[in-house]
Amino acid sequence: MSEFYHQLRGATTKAETLQLTQQAMIARQVGIENGQLVTTSGKLNLPPNIKQQNQDFSHPYYWSSFTLIGNPW
């Protein structure tokens, strides 16, 4: 969701924003590394209760479930 809202600032439609976000996840530009969420806009610290050190979100399990409902503009 962090990547979606970052992409929403520059995209023309919400549908394009969703597509750009999914493409960033597929390209491994979004993930968890050393307790930080890595996005195209930088790194964000995660709460200490998240134990995963590294997580790759390029698998469809992570990005394919996002859908856009309502007005795509």
Image: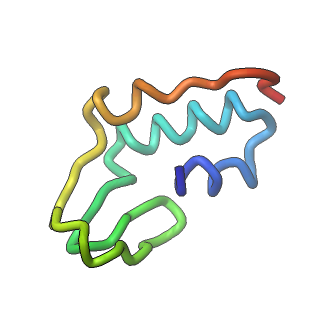
Does residue 54 sit above or below 26 in this rendering?
A: below
Residue 4, position as x, y percentages in the image? 59, 47
Choose between 9 and 49: the one closer to the eye: 49
31 shown above or below 12: below
Total numbered circles: 0
Residue at 43% x, 73% y is 44
Can you say whether 28 is above or below 23 in the image? below
Furthest residue to the front?
49
Give left or right: position of 69 versus 41: right
Residue 45 rendering spot, x and y as whole percentages: 38, 77
Does residue 20 appear to the left or right of 10 in the view shown? Answer: left
Quarter-of-image position of residue 9: bottom right
Hey, which quadrant is residue 54 in on the image?
bottom left
Residue 33 locus on image (x, y percent): 24, 67
- Seen at 28% across and 61% down, the residue is 32
Q: Position of residue 41 (x, y in %)?
A: 54, 66
Q: Residue at x 24, y 72 (%)?
A: 49
Residue for point 54% across, 57% down: 2
Q: Would you identify the image quadrant in which residue 58 lies?
A: top left
User: Dividing the image into 4 quarters, which one contains the C terminus?
Assistant: top right
Q: Is residue 53 above or below residue 58?
A: below
Depth check: give the residue in front, 38 or 47. Answer: 47
Colour approach in the figure: rainbow
